[in-house]
Image: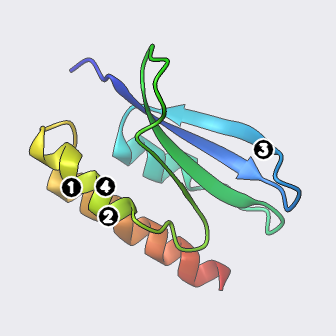
């Protein structure tokens, strides 16, 4: 299936500058590759955006809590862009990541 939505993973410094560390078309790839890095000095920021669009992203979430991501993903389950299983996997992976960082 051709994906129209992309996950952008970034490292964010305490000064607010960022560097893209990956772009992913699926939640499993995001979990296995985009959440894998950690250097202890940067926060992870995730952005969900549409391919080839000048519109604002669908959402941007940052460590440590990634607030609101679970609720926002519900919309994409209803449109079959993401499965409920994959969304649950992502939310759990983010919880685990936050627990390790704490």
Mark 4 residue element: helix
State the residue position of label 3. Answer: 18
Q: 50 above or below 45?
A: above
Tally of numbered discs: 4
Cβ atoms at labels 4 and 2 below 8 Å apart: yes
Q: Quick one: quadrant of the N terminus? A: top left
Return the disc, 3 or 4, that comes first in the chain's sequence: 3
Q: Is residue 1 left or right of residue 70?
A: left
Q: Which mark is residue 74?
A: 1
State the residue position of label 2. Answer: 70
Q: 67 above or below 18?
A: below
Instruction: Name the residue: 31% across, 55% down.
Output: 72
Q: Nearer the viewer, residue 5 or 92?
A: 5
Cβ atoms at labels 1 and 4 below 8 Å apart: yes
Q: Quick one: quadrant of the C terminus? A: bottom right
Cβ atoms at labels 1 and 2 below 8 Å apart: yes
Return the disc, 2 or 3, that comes first in the chain's sequence: 3
């Amino acid at each position: 299936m051709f994906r129209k939505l992309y996950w952008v993973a970034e490292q964010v410094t305490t000064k607010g500058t960022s560097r893209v560390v990956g772009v992913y078309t699926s939640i499993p790839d995001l979990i296995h590759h985009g959440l894998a890095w950690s250097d202890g000095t940067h926060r992870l920021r995730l952005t969900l955006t549409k391919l080839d669009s000048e519109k604002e992203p669908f959402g941007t979430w940052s460590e440590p809590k990634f607030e609101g991501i679970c609720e926002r993903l519900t919309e994409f389950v209803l449109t079959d862009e993401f499965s409920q299983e994959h969304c649950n996997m992502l939310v759990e992976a983010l919880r685990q990541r936050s627990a390790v960082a704490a």
